[in-house]
Amino acid sequence: MILYGISTCPDCKRALKSFAEAGTEITFRDVRSDPMSEAEWAVLLAEFGDRLVDRKSQAFRNLNAWMRESEADAQLADTPALMARPVITDGARYTLGWDDAAKAIWL
């Protein structure tokens, strides 16, 4: 399993802690320090579409007007911290966020 996020994200930290407490092995991928390829973004965008971009984030508000109007793939390639987090996958299933629904699937 892989958890995509950034190391400073509170939801990512909570999810990783929950997996550790449950004894579930998971790989953490920090999309900011270990950038994803266009093909990797494409898989996540196919699954979540524009929901993958956190439009309420400070990072989104800091984008210039042109970038805010760009497609999600361009926004994420330029500023990976825009990704709504965490994204968790086992290769077959994907979840976005760390809420009760995601916990029910993974824990």
Image: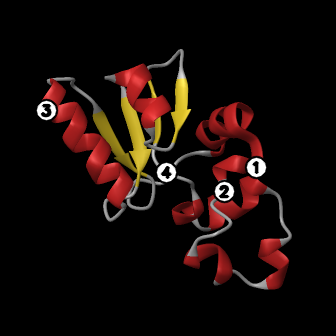
- As helix, strand or loop, the secondary structure at mark 2 comes to loop
- As helix, strand or loop, the secondary structure at mark 3 comes to helix
Q: CA distance from mark 3 to mark 1?
A: 32 Å
Crowding near pointer 3: few (<14 within 10 Å), some, many (20+)? few
Say if 31 sits above or below 55 in the image. above
Closer to the chain start, of discs 4 and 1, is: 1
Q: CA distance from mark 3 to mark 4?
A: 20 Å
Q: CA distance from mark 4 to mark 1?
A: 13 Å
Answer whether labels 2 and 3 touch (C-beta < 8 Å): no
Amino acid type, mark 3: Glu
Q: CA distance from mark 2 to mark 1?
A: 6 Å
Crowding near pointer 2: few (<14 within 10 Å), some, many (20+)? many
Amino acid type, mark 2: Val
Q: Quadrant of the N terminus?
A: top left
Say if 89 sits above or below 45 in the image. above
Residue holding disc 2: 53
- Mark number displayed over residue 85: 4
Amino acid type, mark 4: Arg
Q: Nearer the viewer, residue 55 or 66?
A: 55
- Mark number displayed over residue 21: 3
Closer to the chain start, of discs 3 and 4, is: 3
- As helix, strand or loop, the secondary structure at mark 4 comes to loop
Q: CA distance from mark 2 to mark 3?
A: 29 Å
Residue 90 lies, in percent from the top left, at: 43, 20
Residue 42 lies, in percent from the top left, at: 69, 38
Q: Quadrant of the C terminus?
A: top left
Crowding near pointer 4: few (<14 within 10 Å), some, many (20+)? many
Residue 86 lies, in percent from the top left, at: 45, 46
Crowding near pointer 1: few (<14 within 10 Å), some, many (20+)? some
Say if 13 sits above or below 3 in the image. below
